[in-house]
Image (spheres, rainbow, N blue to C red):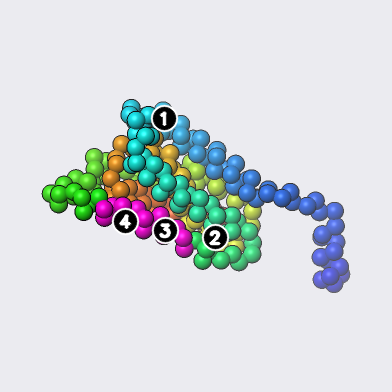
Amino acid sequence: MNTDDLIRSLSQNVAPVPRGALAGRIVAGMAAGAAVTAVIVTGVLGIRPDLHDAMHGFSFWMKWIYTGSLGIGAVVGVLRLARPDVASLRGLWWLTVPVLLLAGIGMGELASTPSREWLAMWLGASWKVCPWLVLTLAMPIFIGLLWSFRRMAPTRLREAGAVAGLAAGAWAATIYCLHCPEVSAIFVLTWYSLGIVLAAGIGALLGPRLMRW
C-alpha cells in the first residue's frame, strides 16, 4: 500500500470534530479547577469581611482587572499551543500592557506617599505568604488544564506547560482577590506576579513530562 492509499484508508469514516470542541474542553478543565480553588478560598482562607465595601473601591477592581487580563491572554496562548501546528506566541506581547499599567499606578502611589511608608506599602501584611498561596491555588486549575490537554496534541510541550501555568496562576490570583485585603498596586505587581510566574515556571518544568502524547 502506498502512502496515498494509506492516508485515504485512515481518513475514511472519521467523524468531524465539532467546532469549538477544543475551546470547550479547555474551558471545562479550567472551570473544574477554578471551582476547587474557589472552595479552598471560601472554605479555608475565608472571604474578606469587607468584600462588599471593597467592591466599591478602586483597589479591588485594579487587582481583578490586572489578574483577569493576564488570565485571558494566557488562555489565548493555551488555545494556540493545544494544536499540533507550530503556533506563534508573538501575539502575547500585549500581556506586558497590564504589567506596565499597574507599574504606572504603583509609581503614582509612591509619588503621593511619604518615602518612610514605601516599605510598608510594598510588603503589606501578607508578602511572605501571598506568592505561595497564589501558587498553591493555581494547582487545581493547572491540573484541570492538564486534563484538557490529554485529548489534544501539543507539540511545544515546554511552552504549552508554561502558558498553562501562567493561565492557572492568573486565574488563581483572581479568585484569591476575594480573600486578600491588600490594596497597594506595588504589592500586587510584586507578590501576585511572583506567584503567577512561579506557576508558569512549574508548568514549564512539568509540561514536557505530563503533556507528552
Q: Are marks 4 and 3 in contact (CB under 8 Å)?
A: no
Q: Secondary structure at mark 1?
A: helix
Q: Nearer the viewer, mark 2 or mark 4?
A: 4
Q: Residues within 10 Å of mark 4 (few under 14, many from 20)?
A: some
Residue 157 disc label: 2
How many numbered discs? Answer: 4
Q: Are marks 2 and 3 in contact (CB under 8 Å)?
A: no
* Upstream in sequence: badge 1 or badge 3: 1
- Where 81 falls versus 66 (above or below)? below
Task: Write the start and end of the magenta stretch as one range.
Answer: 93-108
Q: Secondary structure at mark 4?
A: helix
Q: Nearer the viewer, mark 1 or mark 3?
A: 3
Q: Amino acid at mark 4?
A: Gly
Q: Are marks 2 and 1 in contact (CB under 8 Å)?
A: no
Q: Nearer the viewer, mark 2 or mark 1?
A: 1
- Where 44 falls versus 142 (above or below)? above
Q: CA distance from mark 4 to mark 1?
A: 31 Å
Q: Amino acid at mark 2?
A: Leu
Residue picked out by circle 3 = 97
The residue drawn where x is 55% and y is 55% is: 76
Q: Nearer the viewer, mark 4 or mark 1?
A: 4
